[in-house]
Image (tube, helix red, strand yellow):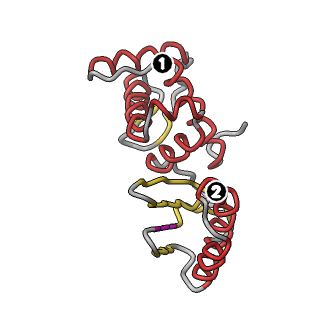
C-alpha cells in the first residue's frame, strides 16, 4: 500500500489531497469518484484522465488541459520496515480532514505552524529528539493535551497569530488520525 499526494490547480486555487492506494491509477480513480460532484468534472474528462494515468509511471502523473492541472506523485510506501512522519503529508492530511468550520478560519500554513510549535514543545520536554528523528528511548512524561494546546496558543500569540483552543485541538486530533493512517500508531 502506498500514499499518493494529489494536487489540483483549478481557477487559480491549489488544493492538495492524500489518498492511500495500491497504484497511482487506483489513487486517482478513487479521488476522482469522491471529488466528482465538488469539482464539476465531466465524465469524459474523468475517463481522459484515467486513460492518461495508464500510460504513465506509478510515481508521477501530471495532467494539464483547459486550465485544469492535476499532479499526482507517490509520497511514501506504507509497507516499509520503518515508518516516517512526513511534515508535508501530515499538513495535507490534517487540513483535508478538518471540519468545514475550522477550514474557513485556517489554511495549510496555519496547520504547519501549529505542528511546528507542537514539535518544539515535544522536543523541549523530551518526548522526541527531532535531530535524531526518533522518539526518545526514555519513558516520556505524560503528555497533557491541555498543557500542549495552551503552550501552542501562547507561542502563536507571541508571534502575533491567534488560534483558538478548539482550532489547535482539532489539528492535534487530526494529526493523530494521520499517524494512525500511516501506521505509526494503532487506533
Q: Magenta stretch: dominant SS?
A: strand
Which mark is in front, 1 or 2?
2
Residue 156 drawn above or below residue 12 = above
Q: Are marks 1 and 2 in contact (CB under 8 Å)?
A: no
Q: Which mark is residue 149?
A: 1
Q: Is 109 colored magenta in this rendering? A: no
Q: Is 70 colored magenta in this rendering? A: yes
Q: Looking at this view, is 39 or 168 the one in front?
A: 39
Residue under the point 52% across and 67% down = 72
Q: Looking at this view, is 48 or 58 the one in front?
A: 48
Q: Secondary structure at mark 1?
A: helix
Q: Name the residue that disc number 2 marks.
A: 35
Q: Which circle's residue, 1 or 2, is located before the other in the chain?
A: 2
Q: Quadrant of the C terminus?
A: top right
Residue range of the region highlighted in magenta in the rendering: 68-72
Residue 7: x and y, percent?
48, 60
Q: Residues within 10 Å of mark 1 (few under 14, many from 20)?
A: many
Residue under the point 50% across and 24% down = 167
Residue 14 drawn above or below residue 128 = below
Q: Secondary structure at mark 2?
A: helix
Residue 47: x and y, percent?
66, 77
Q: Quadrant of residue 39?
A: bottom right
Alpha carbon separation for disc pair 1 and 2:
33 Å
Relative to 21, 115 lies left or right: left
Residue 38: x and y, percent?
62, 53
Q: Looking at this view, is 31 or 22 the one in front?
A: 31
Amino acid at each position: 500500500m502506498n500514499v499518493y499526494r494529489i494536487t489540483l490547480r483549478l481557477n487559480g486555487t491549489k488544493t492538495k489531497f492524500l489518498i492511500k492506494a495500491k497504484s497511482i491509477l487506483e489513487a486517482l480513480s478513487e479521488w476522482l469518484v469522491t471529488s466528482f460532484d465538488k469539482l464539476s468534472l465531466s465524465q469524459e474528462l474523468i475517463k481522459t484522465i484515467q486513460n492518461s494515468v495508464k500510460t504513465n509511471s506509478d510515481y508521477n502523473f501530471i495532467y494539464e488541459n483547459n486550465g485544469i492541472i492535476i499532479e499526482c506523485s507517490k509520497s511514501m510506501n506504507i509497507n516499509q520496515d520503518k515508518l516516517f512522519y512526513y511534515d508535508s503529508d501530515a499538513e495535507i492530511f490534517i487540513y483535508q480532514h478538518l471540519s468545514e468550520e475550522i477550514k474557513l478560519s485556517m489554511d495549510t500554513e496555519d496547520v504547519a505552524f501549529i505542528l511546528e510549535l507542537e514539535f518544539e514543545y515535544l522536543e523541549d520536554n523530551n518526548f522526541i529528539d527531532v535531530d535524531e528523528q526518533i522518539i526518545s528511548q526514555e519513558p516520556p512524561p505524560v503528555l497533557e493535551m491541555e498543557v500542549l494546546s495552551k503552550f501552542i496558543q501562547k507561542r502563536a500569540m507571541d508571534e502575533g497569530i491567534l488560534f483558538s483552543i478548539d482550532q489547535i485541538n482539532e489539528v492535534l486530533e487530526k494529526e493523530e488520525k494521520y499517524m494512525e493512517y500511516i501506521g505509526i500508531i494503532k487506533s
